[in-house]
Image (cartoon, rainbow, N blue to C red):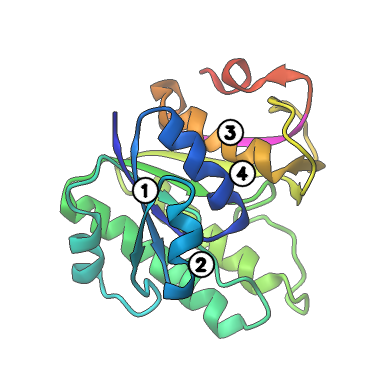
Amino acid sequence: MSRILLIGGHGKVALLLEPLLVERGHHVTAVIRNPDHEREVAATGAVPLVADIETFDTDQLENLIAGNDVVVWSAGAGGGNPARTYAVDRDAAIRSIDAAIGAGVRRYVMVSYFGAGPDHGVAPDSSFFPYAEAKAAADAHLRASGLDYTIVAPSSLTLDPPTGRIDTAAAASGSVSRADVAAVIAAVIDDDSTIGRTIRFNSGDVPIAHAIAG
């Protein structure tokens, strides 16, 4: 059993992930911003913890992270406001990485997206540009951190039911269900062969455990 701190605990993927982690025997603390969401998160078996990671400094985040075995970053500003996107998806994510180092929590799983990186190709006048820039910076900081990281990079998200199967070999982004993304995150936490890797994937035909194995 691991103690897992899930940052962004009320997101659509997170709400699907929490019961999977609990079923695997993990203790899950789900960080949420809105106290109105506590009951919904608690119903998954996770323990809700209200904290505003956008305003927390590194020391506060270190206190939040300390005592856990794994950090999962599944938070996001949700787009629409470039300033908030940079504040959450880049700056708060980077602070959480530094806080994990300070707290001595080695395992860190970042939820990113298929095309993330400095060569993301998103035009500066696109509404998606701040998110693409923010994720590129956060992912790069994590790769350079020395932590035992895995970056989970799904393609476009759907509300389709889970299939339990993905494709990690595709060269281009397609789509994948949020339920399968949740299953991938749960699987990488339990598979140390995923440490130090970025796993890009679409829906596919290969069972998740086999697809992610190093």
Q: Are marks 3 and 2 in contact (CB under 8 Å)?
A: no
Residue 213 vs 149, above or below: the answer is above
Q: Is residue 83 left or right of residue 204?
A: left
Earlier-in-chain disc, 1 versus 3:
1
Specify the quadrant of the image occupied by residue 64. bottom left
Spatial CA span between label 1 and label 3: 26 Å
Residue 197 vs 58, above or below: the answer is above
Q: Is 184 part of what is drawn in magenta?
A: no
Closer mark to the observer between disc 1 and disc 2? 2
Disc 3 residue type? Ala
Disc 2 residue type? Asp
Disc 4 residue type? Ala
**Mark carried by residue 183:** 3
| Rendered residue at 67%/36% (across/down) | 180
Earlier-in-chain disc, 1 versus 4:
1
Closer mark to the observer between disc 3 and disc 2? 3
| Rendered residue at 40%/76% (across/down) | 54
Q: Position of residue 143 (x, y in %)?
A: 41, 46
Closer mark to the observer between disc 1 and disc 4? 4
Task: Provide the residue designation for mark 2.
Answer: 89
Disc 1 residue type? Ala
| Rendered residue at 74%/42% (across/down) | 177
- Name the one closer to the observer, 13 or 79: 13
Q: Position of residue 12 (x, y in %)?
A: 62, 55
Task: Provide the residue designation for mark 1.
Answer: 144
Q: Magenta segment, which residues?
A: 196-203
Spatial CA span between label 3 and label 2: 22 Å
Q: Position of residue 110 (x, y in %)?
A: 47, 48
How many numbered marks are there?
Answer: 4
